[in-house]
Image (spheres, helix red, strand yellow):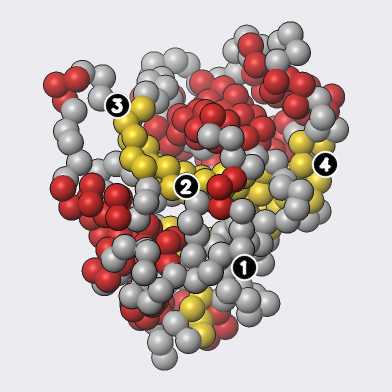
Amino acid sequence: MATLFGAMLSIAVRAQQPPMESKAPEARHAVMAVAWGYPVTAYAAFLGSLRRTGYSGAILLFEPRPQKKQHEQPPSKEVSEIVAMHGASAQRVDFPRDIPLYVGRFVVYARACREGGFLACMSADFRDVYFQENPFLRLPSPTPDLVLPLESKTIGKEPHNHLGVLKCYGADVVQAISNRTVACAGVLIGSPKGFEVLSETLPALVRGCHLSKGSLAVRTAKQLIADQAALNVFVYHHLGLDGSKHEAQVVGDDVVRAVQTTLHVAASSVSPALRGGSSLGSALREGLRVRFEAAGAGIVYTLGSAHKGGKAAEAFQAEHMKDGYILNADQTLAPVLHQCEPCGTPRREHALPFAA
C-alpha cells in the first residue's frame, strides 16, 4: 500500500510541471508565516508546493529581529535564492518580547494584513505545512472574518490544550469548553479585522495567565497556553461560540464585549484600538463572521498522527489517498495539509521557480 511519505514524493514530482491556472483575485490575498532557522528543504517544500498550485499572490515570511544588532545573521545564499525565485518576501521585524514567539506572530500578521490592504490572509506554520491547491479558491464570498479549521479531538481529550487552559484559567473554564472541538491556530484564514481581533486577544490571554509571575510554572504554562489554547478560550469561552454551526455571526456589541472582557481578565487596559471610534472599534461594532470547518471537510486538513504508522495510519491512507494526493472525507482535494511531517523533506525539484 502507498505511504503518505510516498504521496509527498509523488507530489514533489509535480513541482516540475507548469503551475495551475488560478482564478482567485490574488492581489487581495497573502500567505504569512514565521520562517526562521529552518533548513533549505523546508523553504523548498512550503514555497514550491504553494506556487505549484497556481497561487500568484503575496507570500510574506517573517523572522524576529535580534535584540542586539551584532547578533544578526544574514540568511544563507541558498535560502535567499529560493525565497526570491518563488516571489516571496522575507522580513526581519520586531516581535513582542514578553510572550512566546508563536503568540506574538499574530501581532505581526495583523499589521501586515492591514497595511497590505488585503481582503484575506492565511497564517500558517512553516515546517509541516504543504499545499495541494490554492487555499483561497474555496474561500466563500463575502470573506469571513475568521476561518477556523477544526481538529479531530475535543479540548477535554487533547492534553496540551486541556493542560494549558486548566493551569492558566482554572477548572471552570476547562469544564465550560471541554466538549468543544479544538480550533487550530497553526493554519487559519482571516480578514484584516479578524487578525486584528486575534492580535488584541491572544497576547492578552497569555499575559493574563493566573499563575504567579516569574516562576518556572508560569513560563511553562504560558508556553502551553501559547496560541492554540488561547484561541480556543477566546472563541468558545469569551465569544460564546460552540463550533457546531458551520458559520456564526456574532453581533457587534457582543464582539466588543468579548474583546473587552478578554482584556479585562488579562488585566490589560482597554485597547486604544477600541476607543474613540477607531477603525477597528467601528469595524467590531459591525460584528464578526466566524466560519468553522471540520477536519477533513474544508481548506485545511490537520493530519496529526495519520502518517506515523500503525492501523490508524493504514486506515487513513486507504480512505484519503488517491493518485499521490491527500483527499478530504468527501474525496475532494485537501488544499492545505497541516502537521504533515514527511512534507518537510521533499525532493529538490521544489526549489524550481514557479514561473514556467
Q: How far apart are marks 2 and 3 (CA)?
A: 21 Å
In x, y percent, where is residue 287?
Answer: 80, 32
Q: How crowded is mark 3: few (under 14 residues within 10 Å), some or many (20 or more)?
A: some
* Between discs 4 and 2, the one toward the N terminus: 2
Q: Nearer the viewer, residue 274 or 168?
A: 274
Circles 3, 4 touching at the beta carbon (< 8 Å) = no
> What residue lies at 26% left-to-right and 19% top-to-bottom?
67
Q: Which of 54 and 262 is in front in this view?
A: 54
Residue bearing mark 2: 58
Q: Tell us which disc is closer to us: 4 or 2.
A: 2
> What residue lies at 58% left-to-right and 74% top-to-bottom?
333
Which quadrant is the N terminus positioned in? bottom left
In x, y percent, where is residue 277?
Answer: 75, 13
Residue bearing mark 3: 65
In x, y percent, where is residue 49?
Answer: 40, 64
Q: How far apart are marks 4 and 2 (CA)?
A: 28 Å
Circles 3, 1 touching at the beta carbon (< 8 Å) = no
> What residue lies at 76% left-to-right and 36% top-to-bottom?
288
* Between discs 1 and 4, the one toward the N terminus: 4
Residue bearing mark 4: 249
Which amino acid type corresponds to the residue marked 4 in the rendered image?
A: Gln
Q: Residue furthest toward the front?
A: 356
Q: What element carries label 2?
A: strand
Which amino acid type corresponds to the residue marked 2 in the rendered image?
A: Ala
